[in-house]
Image: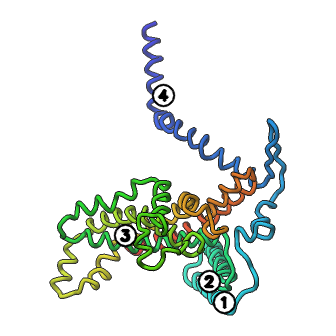
């Protein structure tokens, strides 16, 4: 009997040892399935349906692509894409240049190192690029209002460019042997610890030209009566500034860590040879910093597409829909119980995010990593 018990316990222990990896990973897989995969599938079904709530029940009716058609061709076109009233000469010129550049890029790939899977990916990227150029040519360059897609892209590209420029500048300054470097590092990192809601309310108060803490400064520069929330571009700019204030520390701290890990031997040798500071940065520092910079900007691109807190708190998407991002657009549709439209907008945002971020990763991050290797 004892031998049988020992044999059973030994076999159980051996089985546990053999399946330990599966047992440890199973809880994580179950959590992902419950909290990620199931909502993803459920929202996909809702995106192709018309979801209506009733008294104590709900009704789901399959409508196919109608939720998406409304965003591109129907009653929601002005909200998602913008208002189209013909394209200006400048818009046509920019569009033709973009199409020609995309065709040249695809042809060059075909005649250099063609691979059918890579070619398909480049076709998707080129179509997305041309579509976005046509969108801005028919709206922004033609004097008409663009929709939530254009607003989201403005937040992404303008915000990320500003954050990278200032974050890199601060990292280069704090990498120098100056007094108080540790103090400045802590100060620059503080905004990242504040919640987006708090930042939204803080910037809404700071930008108040009549009752805010800097109202006297606004009065002094002659902007005491300027209602920035009623001007589309001023409102967008304030939101970009608030978002940048929060995320510049993220870019700063990662680039600073990368700068401090660059070997100093080459820089010191270049200084001995008489190279200027700009030459050292361009030929030595930047090539080694580029893989990290590309990676941190990829992370920021993904996060910037999800911007919803600041435009909701600072302007509520106004004036009109001038500051409404796609995430906020989806939230407003969900709040009115139009769940089908909300899910459709969310999946359109997912598609745009995936195509742009995958393109950036493949053509910028991976290419730079291969070049560095």
Q: Image quarter for residue 305?
A: bottom right
First in residue order: circle 4 vs circle 3: 4
What is the secondary structure assignment of the residue under circle 1? helix
- In space, the residues marked 1 and 4 are separated at their CA atoms by 66 Å
**Which-is-in-front pick, marks 1 and 4?**
1
For disc 2, the marked residue is 102
Residue farthest to the left, as pictured? 272
First in residue order: circle 1 vs circle 3: 1
For disc 4, the marked residue is 15
**Going 53% across and 60% down the picture, which residue do you hit?**
310
Q: Is residue 191 above or below residue 137?
A: above
What is the secondary structure assignment of the residue under circle 2? helix
- In space, the residues marked 4 and 3 are separated at their CA atoms by 52 Å
Percent across and percent down for residue 95 are 66, 86
**Going 23% across and 70% down the picture, which residue do you hit?**
263
**Going 70% across and 50% down the picture, which residue do you hit?**
43
For disc 3, the marked residue is 167
**Which-is-in-front pick, marks 4 and 3?**
3
Which quadrant: the C terminus?
Answer: bottom left
Q: Is residue 192 left or right of residue 48?
A: left
- In space, the residues marked 4 and 2 are separated at their CA atoms by 57 Å
For disc 1, the marked residue is 96
First in residue order: circle 1 vs circle 4: 4
- Label 4 with label 2: CB-CB less than 8 Å: no
**Which-is-in-front pick, marks 2 and 3?**
3
Is the residue marked by circle 4 packed among few (<14), some (14-19), or many (20+) residues within 10 Å? few
Is the residue marked by circle 1 packed among few (<14), some (14-19), or many (20+) residues within 10 Å? some
Res. 366 in view = no
Percent across and percent down for residue 23 are 50, 33
First in residue order: circle 2 vs circle 3: 2
What is the secondary structure assignment of the residue under circle 4? helix
Q: Image quarter for residue 231?
A: bottom right
């Amino acid at each position: 009997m004892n031998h049988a018990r020992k044999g059973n316990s030994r076999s159980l222990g051996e089985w546990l040892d053999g399946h330990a990896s599966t047992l440890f990973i199973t809880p994580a897989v179950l959590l992902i399935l419950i909290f990620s995969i199931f909502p993803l599938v459920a929202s996909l079904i809702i995106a192709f349906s018309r979801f209506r709530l009733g008294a104590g029940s709900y009704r789901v009716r399959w409508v196919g692509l109608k939720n998406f058609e409304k965003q591109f061709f129907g009653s929601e076109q002005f909200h998602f894409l913008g208002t189209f009233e013909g394209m200006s000469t400048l818009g046509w010129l920019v569009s033709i240049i973009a199409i020609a550049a995309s065709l040249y890029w695809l042809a060059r790939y075909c005649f250099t190192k063609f691979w059918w899977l890579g070619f398909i990916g480049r076709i998707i990227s080129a179509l997305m690029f041309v579509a976005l150029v046509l969108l801005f040519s028919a709206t922004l360059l033609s004097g008409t209002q663009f929709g939530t897609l254009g607003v989201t892209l403005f937040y992404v590209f303008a915000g990320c460019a500003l954050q990278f420029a200032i974050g890199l500048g601060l990292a280069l300054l704090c990498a120098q042997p100056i007094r108080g470097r540790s103090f400045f590092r802590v100060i620059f990192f503080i905004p990242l610890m504040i919640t987006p809601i708090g930042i939204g309310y803080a910037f809404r108060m700071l930008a108040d030209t009549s009752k805010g803490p800097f109202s006297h400064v606004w009065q002094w520069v002659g902007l005491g009566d300027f209602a920035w929330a009623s001007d589309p571009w001023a409102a967008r700019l304030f939101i970009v500034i608030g978002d940048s204030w929060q995320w510049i520390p993220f870019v700063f701290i990662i680039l600073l860590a990368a700068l401090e890990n660059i070997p100093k031997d080459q820089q010191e040798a270049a200084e001995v040879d008489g190279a200027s500071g700009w030459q050292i940065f361009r030929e030595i520092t930047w090539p080694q910093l580029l893989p990290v910079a590309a990676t941190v900007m990829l992370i920021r691109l993904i996060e910037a597409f999800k911007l919803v807190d600041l435009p909701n708190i600072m302007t509520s998407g106004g004036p009109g829909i001038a500051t409404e991002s796609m995430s906020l657009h989806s939230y407003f549709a969900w709040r009115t119980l139009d769940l089908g439209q909300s899910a459709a907008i969310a999946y359109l945002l997912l598609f745009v995010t995936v195509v742009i971020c995958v393109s950036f990763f493949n053509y910028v991050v991976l290419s730079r990593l291969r070049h560095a290797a």
